[in-house]
Image (cartoon, rainbow, N blue to C red):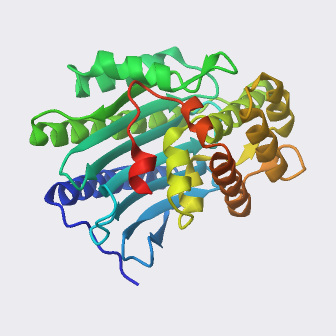
Amino acid sequence: MQRTAASSNRATEALNLLSALQNRFVEGLTRLTESHASSQGFTPVEWFRDEGVHGGGVRFETADGELYGRGSVNVSQVHYDDMPEKKLGSASAISTIIHPAHPLAPSVHIHISWTEMKSGQGYWRMMADINPSNENEAEREQFLTTMKNAAPDQFAEAKAQGDRYFFIPALNRHRGVAHFYLENYATDDAEADLMLARSVGEAAIDGYLKILTAALDNPTEATEAEQANQLAYHTLYLFQVLTLDRGTTTGLLVHNQNDVGIMGSLPAYVDRDLLDSWIARMQPPQDKLLKALIDALPEQNPALVNEAVKQKLAAVVRNHYRAHPQAIAMQASGDSIPPTVDNHR
């Protein structure tokens, strides 16, 4: 089986950039594991959209190691060159999440994608956010400064959009402490946009690796309270991804051929009781969604989120929004809402 690529030159340029960013991040994470004499590695896993006819992707994943509890660095390209009835030409993306095992080492989420219509119009989506279980103001300022240097002209807008996107109304708080998000971004200068995507991606990767290296090279033993904070924060992370994240929902509604990859951002363990305490805060029909997600988790607490559970959770989300399509409007948005779901159908 072989993955085909999109015919568009801009989609090819985007995929080349995203693959280079993937290699940059995996190599950096691998160097870190080697410097700690750890055997934990990142295993490539390939997936195919319609047996490769419409593309697919490869992710490098790791789990349950000395340094990383969960980690996924996924690059994919889906295209519909042979389907004239679809408005979408191609979608190329890198999506990555690293959840370190140590409670005092922050998680990171990075997503950069190029979406191109058959008309030739397209837009970038650039996200980078640092997610500590136990907040560290110095790390927050360091990450924000890194992103500001990477995109000085766009930083104020990106920070504002990120703060809106990662706000959780039901809990009156944010996921993460430092947010960068450019939604539906495009100018008249395609080359400049590509270079901005490169600058943002490289800065987010290198900036996080610097923060992570400092945290792991000089580790402080975590207290019981800090360990408890990690479980609570990972529970919040799953909650935000599965009830508010528009990108996750879009991917699950489009197809079911990469559910485990799409759910690659989920942490290893979550607190069922904490999730249950949030049901009463949810507006209908999202209260039903959260209840169904909890029911899909193992009964023991903390609940292990393994591959089988990820597939169950993916099915819950997909079925919920097919039954309640109006609820998609209740999901997070930085500013404008790209018509991604409609264009994929």
* Relative to 333, 239 lies left or right: right
**Residue at image point 68% right, 53% down:** 319
In front here: 249 or 167?
249
- Residue 277 located left or right of residue 5: right
Q: Using the image as rendered, state which of residue 213 and residue 89 is in the foreground.
A: 89
Q: Nearer the viewer, residue 167 or 316?
A: 316
Residue 56's x, y, as percent? 40, 67
Direction bottom: furthest residue? 1
Give x and y (percent) for residue 227. 75, 32
Image location (x, y in percent) of residue 248: 53, 46
Identity of the residue drawn at 55% across and 32% down: 329
Q: Quadrant of the N terminus?
A: bottom left
* Marker count (numbered): 0
Residue at 54%, 51% (x, y): give it: 71
In which image quadrant can residue 269 be found?
Answer: top right
Using the image, determine if residue 97 lies above or below residue 286.
below
* Residue 297 shows up from this direction: no
Can residue 212 be spotted in the picture?
yes
- Please determine whether, in this image, residue 35 is positioned above or below residue 167: below
Residue nearest the viewer, comparing 91 with 65: 91
State left or right for residue 118 relative to residue 334: left
Residue at the extreme right: 299
Can you give x and y, in whole percent of width and height, for residue 78 in the image? 36, 62
Seen at 23% across and 42% down, the residue is 198
Where is the C terminus found, in terms of image quarters?
bottom left
Q: Is residue 330 above or below residue 31?
A: above
